[in-house]
Each structure stands twice: as C-alpha cells, then as structure tokens.
Image (cartoon, rainbow, N blue to C red):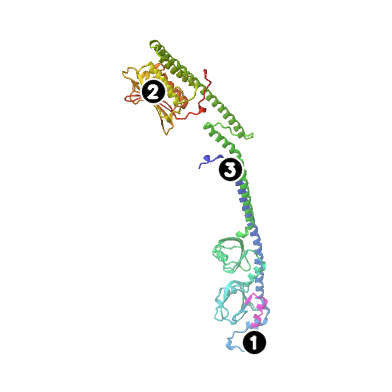
Amino acid sequence: MRWRNIRYQTKLLILFVVLSCFPALMIGTIGYQRSADTLRMQNLQNMDLILGQLKSSIERRVSDFDRFSMLPYYMPNIFSFLNTPYASVEQWGSKEISAQRTMVRLISAYPSINASIQGLVVYGMNGTITGYRLAGETQINRNEKVQESDWYREVMEAGGGFVVTGLNEIRQFNGPSSNAIIGARMLRDEEFRPLAVIAMFISPEFISNIVRSQEFRNLEIMVLDKQNNMIYASEEQLAKRLLTSGIQPDGKGEWQTRVKSDAGDKTFVGVYQRSDYLGWNVYIGIDRDEMLAGSRSIRNFTALIIVVVACLAVMLSWLLARGLSKPISQLIRSMRAVERGQFLIPKPHVRGDEIGQLESSYGRMVKRLHDLIQTIEEKERQKRHSELYALRARIQPHFLYNTLNSIRMLAILQQSTQIAKLIHSLNKLLQANMKLDTELVTLQEEVELLKSYASLMDLRYTNVFEVEWRIPERVLQAAIPPMLLQPLVENAIFHGAQGLNRKLSITVEARLEDYERILTVEIRDDGRGFSKTAGEPFRLRERSPGSGNIGLRNVQDRIRLRFGEEYGLTVGRTDRETVITIRMPYRLLEKELNRHVEPSGGGR
C-alpha cells in the first residue's frame, strides 16, 4: 500500500509514534551501551586487582616451598650422608643403615611443615636416592630415569636456584603414579660443588585453597605453567577453550572467549597476568551475562520506559489524529451526501483553528448551494407551469375553433336534436381542458374524454373513422397527464383520413411492459400516415412549428417535462399502419398526487 493511499489519521498516528518512540529508543540504546561499557571497565579493573592479589598469594606460598628446599643446608647430618661414597644396599653395614634412617627421619619432617608437600626425594650426586611420601607406596622406584627428565635438567641449569614446574606425572615411587607440582633445587657442598637435588612434590590443591579463602563470587580462575599446560582450573570447559583459543599472554591484558555447552553458549571476559617469579600465567574471568546483569536492569528499565512512552504516544497520537481527522471525515461524508443531492450541513465544532474555519466556510457553501438548488427548482417549476399554460393556450383556440364551426354548420343544415348531445360532449371537453393545471388524472378519465372527443369528431366526419378500444381494466387507474392522448387521436383522424376512400380504423391500446414498470399506450391507424420508411421512427424535432404537428410536439414536451428525457413519444410506420407510441412510468394515482400546480382561474 502506498503511503499517499493511507488514511490521514493512520499517517498521523504512525508519524507521532515514530517521533515519540525513536528518541526514547535511541536514548535507551545509547544509555545501555554506555552503562554496559562502564560496567565492563569497572569489572575488568576490579578483576585485575583481584588477580594481582591472587597471584601474590600463590607466589608467597611457592616462596615458602623455596625456603623449605634450603633446609638441608641447616642439617649437617644430611650433608654427611650425601658426602659418603655410594654403596649398594647389599653392602650396607650398621653405619650406612643408621645414616639412611636418619636421612629418612629428616625428610619425613617436611610434610609436617606444610601439608601441601605430598612427598620429597633427594637425589645425591653420589648415587644415593632417599625419599618419602605421605600416602601410598614409599619405596623408591629406582627404574625411573630422573636425570633424563626436563625438570631435572632445568634444575641443573639453574645452578642452585629454585625451580617450579607445572603438573608432572610422579613415578618416583613404586605403585600407581600421581600428578603434582615439582619444586626442586640443586644443593651444593662447601666448595660449591653439586651435592644433590632435592625435589618436593607439591599438591595443586594449595591453589584451590587460596581461591576458596578469597571467596570469589561468579569468578573463574585458571593457572597455566610456562608451557601453557593447565595447573588449576575452576571451570574445565573454559580452561579447554583457553588452551585452544590461541591466546598468547604477554605480561598482562584482557581476554574474551566463547564456551559452548549443553546448557547453552556463554561468553567469558576477563584479565590475565604473568608471574615473573614463577613464569606461570594466571587467568580470571566472569560470564559476561552475569557481569552485565546490572546493565541489563538499566536496559529493562529503559525498555519499560520506552513501552510506557510508546503507549502514551499511541494514545495521545490517536486522540490528536482523531481530533484532526474526524472533522475532515465529516466533511467527506457531507460532500458525498451533497453528491447524492442531500444538502446536509455537518455539525460544527467550536474551534478557531484552520479546520474550524474550513468547517464554517464549507457549511456556508453547502447552505448557499442548497438555496441555489431550491431557487433553480422553483424556477423550473414555474417554467413548467408556464409551459403547461402555454400549451393549453395553444391547444384551446385550435380545438375550439374547429368544434364550434362544426356545431354552427350542423345547426344551420340539420337543425338536429343531436346538437344537445354534441354540446354536452363539448362541455365535457371544455371541462377536461380546464383540468390541464392538474398534475395527473387516471387513464380511465382520459379514455372517457377520448370517447367524448371521438363522438364529436364522428358528428363532424360522419362515417369517416371508427375507434377500437383495447384498454385492460388493470391499467385504468394508471396516472397520466390530462389531455395527453387527445392530440394523438386528433392527429390520426386528420392525417390518416386524408385521401382515403374507405373508413379509417383507429385502435387505442394500453399495456404494461418492463416487469410492469412502464405504461405503454399505442394509437394505430390504417390511413395514409407519414411519408416515412416502414419501421423508421418519426423525428418530431425535424418539423417546423407550422407543419401541422403542434399536438405531437406538445405531447412529447409534456411527457419529458413531467417524467424525464428517457420517456416520451415515438411515431413509426409498419406495412399497413401508422403507430404512435407513448411510454411513461406506470404509477397508480394517489390522492395526494392529484393536486393543482396553482389555483384554477375558473374553479368550481
């Protein structure tokens, strides 16, 4: 649907709603975006502070293990044992066995110092291996080639510095292996020669203990070693995603990744920091939806405001649009009524704006147009009355002259008693002629008039014509203008009988046509008629006023003036007869319709 074809009220409603809702929508969107960005920055800053504290806690705990690894320097018995040349177990004597027991007793004290130390092994450069662990098999697995492992080489390269690895599979003891963080240091003698390597097997649970002690809400913690291998993760799916996301940590920064799960996709954002002391990377993150929960409350509140504003805008827009379009709609309905001829002035609204002025101007225009139409109708009615009186004035002299002349001649020649009958018929004709100012008479009255007229004409033209009446009883009460058929019968007698050597036959017939909506009256005669081709209608307007067809033209004019241009009179010629046909609407005469156009001058 094109915009210009939409109703004006609908256009105003759409326009007002858009103008009112669009700014609110823009303000709400910008406000939500700003609040979301601000909340995100605040959360990232807070997480960065929390991460710094967490990293420091981990480093402090590992520094404790660093100090624990230096305890052998304060235990001379351990150095004495490690400086003793290596001897196989089969060669041990009481001295070696006592020294071994002392070494194990000293090593077993480490777990009591820190519960996170699950076990400890000292690899002497003299080939001795002494170890202890809290749970499981405590016998050393001498088949494990520790010297070939990466962590051992890293310890040797550190030259006495403390080395912390990520999670490693511990196979230094017989029985099932386990995973632990290795904290190791190379011990040197008094001459700074490598004496032994002490390796502590640290449970990663110390990290989870630190995390639990901090009581982080809705935060996820991940710790990766130097090779980006996972040490600790509070969320396994997120940790796997971080390992495969290709994030290359460098010092500190922000990160974001998307995690897919059966519960639905989640987007996590957070920060990371690298520990220079450990070489580990510590990640902290939060579900973005949870982080922006506060911002979403702003968004929901903004959406509520937009909905309320939209509803108010719709109501106000509807009222305003209705106030503007209702008077216009009334004007349109009034215009359509005026098109149908109903000059209804719309009820004016008390308003002084442009629409009120338009209503006032339109009302005055309709009233003036109504007055003009009434004036025109009155003039047309007066014109019709004048034409009717003019027709009567034109008919009366012509008819009265011929009739009176006939009476005079008959009285002179015959002195007949039929003069009384003739005068009586003439009186009836004169009385009917005085009813020309009557709107309508019945067809029965008109036929009686024709019969009186035919009697007069038969007295005048003895044995010249005969009339056959075919008038059904059902049409006798049909309404027709008075003195309408007399000129037609007169025309048939005068023109049909000229030069005719036999008696003229005239037929007057009436019938209903077009589903009884049309009254048709035919007057046929078998006289000479008009010099027209058979079947071709006779055009009354082609004849001049002096052509002798004044009566036919008068009948035509009266029918059209009374009923409209679609009705009237036609004249045609068949092979044997001249046919004059009158068509007019079939109406039954009602008393209220049988009224005078104006008072008769000679009324009785």
Q: Position of residue 24 (x, y in %)?
A: 62, 48
Q: Is residue 462 in view?
A: yes
| Residue for badge 2 | 539
Q: Amino acid at mark 2?
A: Arg
Q: Residue at x 56, y 28 (%)?
A: 370
Closest to the observer: 463 or 93? 463
Q: Nearer the viewer, mark 3 or mark 1?
A: 3
Q: Which mark is residue 98?
A: 1
Is 104 a magenta residue? yes
Q: Position of residue 492 (x, y in %)?
A: 37, 21
Q: Is residue 328 above or below residue 134?
A: above
Alpha carbons under labels 2 and 3: distance apart: 63 Å
Alpha carbons under labels 3 and 1: distance apart: 101 Å
| Residue for badge 3 | 13
Q: Position of residue 78 (x, y in %)?
A: 65, 81
Q: Is residue 542 above or below residue 202?
A: above
Splitting the image into 4 quarters, where does residue 191 fall?
bottom right
Alpha carbons under labels 1 and 2: distance apart: 158 Å
Q: Is residue 253 above or below residue 311?
A: below
Q: Kindly give the residue lying farthest to the top in the view shown.
A: 412
Closest to the observer: 109 or 590? 590
